[in-house]
Image: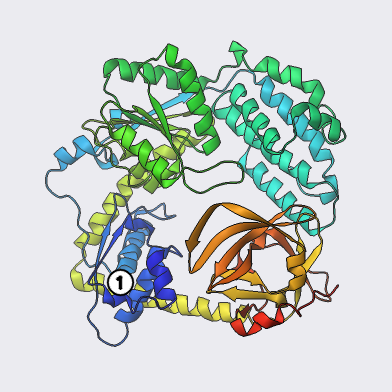
Amino acid sequence: QTLLNGLEKNNVCAIVDFSLIIFDECHHTCKNHPYNVIMQHYLGVKHGPSVPLSQIVGLTASVGVGENKSLQGAIDHVLMLCANMDSCVISTVQRNLSELAQFVPIAQHSTWASPCNLIHTVGRRRADPFADIIKDIMAKVEDLLLSLNLPEKERGTQQYEQWVIKVQREGSMISIPDKELEQKFLQKYNDALFINEDTRAKDAMNYLEKFFHRENVFLTELVTCKREMLPSFSEKLHDLQSCLNNPENENPKLLKLEEILRDEYQMNAATKSILFVKTRAISEAMESWINEIKTELPHLKPSKLIGRAKSKHHEGMTLNQQSGAVDEFREEQGSNLLIATSVADEGLDIQRCNLVLLYDYVGNVIKSVQTRGRGRAENSKCMLITTLKGGLAEKEKVNLLMEKVMYTAIENVQKLDPVTRAKKMEGLQKATLSSAEFQRMLQRFKKTEEDIYFLHCIKCKELVCKSSDIRLVENTHYTVISSAFMELVDHKPHQKPMSFDGISKIGKIHHKTCTKDWGITAIYKSLKLPIIKIQSFIFKKENSNVHIVLNKWKDFPGIIAVFSFEEIGQIGENVLSAE
């Protein structure tokens, strides 16, 4: 991304200034990934006037098959990746395949029943009273949102989570008093159902309690101040708590995981395993569960590895914390069980790791190969633990089939004569460049709308500024040059100040009235500027009933002027006018 930013802002003279560029995990060189955009700069030079070109090297364990289900589709995908990388050679292991298979389990050389691809399926709980109670509470909260007239989805699913997000978006664009809390609670209850499904009711309850504390509303106080929102919550607290330690509600997946851990570490006390889980919340719950069963499995020394990005309700790990967790796992006497999210899918190289556990964790062909490849020790194993009716066991079997198709596709491309392959790649490259230019033209066309939009706070709906008050800084950030806007803002120091893209982040800005997070305060060339985030506002078109809520500034239909130092003197005179 740093290289791409330099190319886009002309801080780097040209892509060909580099004699050699190495792309690790080069299977990402597709669509709008920074790798692919960098290579489009390269291809633009290649298909222009003749100049010396950089040497391009790509490294990956799996090129994938894209969305294809046929051999020809997989061949086309491999050719497209070669064209994007301008790769005239695909180098794979040809000799010593048997030795490779001892360290890198490959579907081409194994079957589903082999130790490297064990699939353990278990049934669901016979009864799940905790989930039933939570769903009943959710139904009562949903009754308060019927005015949005949106379809209800099955609770405890990703589809339901998407429905809640849609409710939040629709609710933000119309004035519905006191609905934000209801929507937030639905999302948290749905998260709790996910946690309960994968771990324990106890962990799901802990998650909800932490959420209430983060909102500065304790359980007992919540019922008092929002009795109309959760009419049965206080009545259900005792019932929920009675579910927490009921042995009849034990999770079959956890029991199977405990059995596997016991067997594997008894067979080999030096076992080092990575346990992949879907979310940070589940990683926390899993760590708590493992620490509690250490009396029965005292040999376990768990640690956790999650991403750096901070989500709404989960702090990420710092780079030092991540490095510390990996180093501890790498040490012979250090941690022997690393609980990890997708951050460990790629690039983690631990020679002693001999067991990879996928806990309801299945993706596409690339993810299947990458996660299995974290087992670096000789004769390492990879096991999937999932439910019978979840569909993930079948999905993983399809992945293993398509992995074999992928290797066949690679062999087919390798067998193409160089002239034929070069001709195919040239055609694909020119089509890519034409498509990229067309998209740039469309983007310029989209930005011809000169209409003014009024920005309203997404939480309290107060008018805060106009789109004509917004300026683009360094082609990346958006500031407001309205003095009236600044009067609405409350400034607080940033907990993690840092510098990036030519600005220094020093503070946070919130709406004085409703405390909604509007963005950050930054220093740009000795000026202190508010940098706003688009998700915090509703855009209402002038003289129209059109309302839009956006996630990215590139989707804003109007024109944003570029920041100019000449306008600084106008800030004091720029007054926000009422609609």
Figure check: 435 above or below 293 = below
Mark 1 neighbour density, 10 Å: few (under 14) some (14–19) many (20 or more) = many
* Residue 144 place in picture, x, y as percent: 84, 41
Location of residue 183 (image quadrant): top right
Give whichever of 213, 16 is nearer the camera: 213
Along the horizontal axis of the image, is 514 left or right of 267?
A: right
Give whichever of 367, 323 is nearer the camera: 323
Residue at the (36%, 60%) spot, across then down: 77
Give whichever of 61, 501 is nearer the camera: 501
* Residue 357 place in picture, x, y as percent: 39, 31
Seen as rendered, the residue at the extreme right is 228
Q: Is residue 83 visible?
A: yes
Residue at the (32%, 47%) spot, across then down: 347
Location of residue 33 (image quadrant): bottom left
Q: Is residue 547 visible?
A: no
Give whichever of 398, 532 is nearer the camera: 532
Q: Amino acid at mark 1?
A: Met
Figure check: 196 above or below 54 = above
Seen as rendered, the residue at the extreme front is 526
Location of residue 334 (image quadrant): top left
Residue position for label 1: 425
Seen as rendered, the residue at the extreme left is 95
Along the horizontal axis of the image, is 501 left or right of 512?
A: left
Quadrant of the drawing holding the C terminus: bottom right
* Residue 207 place in picture, x, y as percent: 62, 31
* Residue 131 place in picture, x, y as percent: 67, 26
Figure check: 346 above or below 44 = above
Quadrant of the drawing holding the N terminus: bottom left
The secondary element bearing badge 1 is classed as: helix
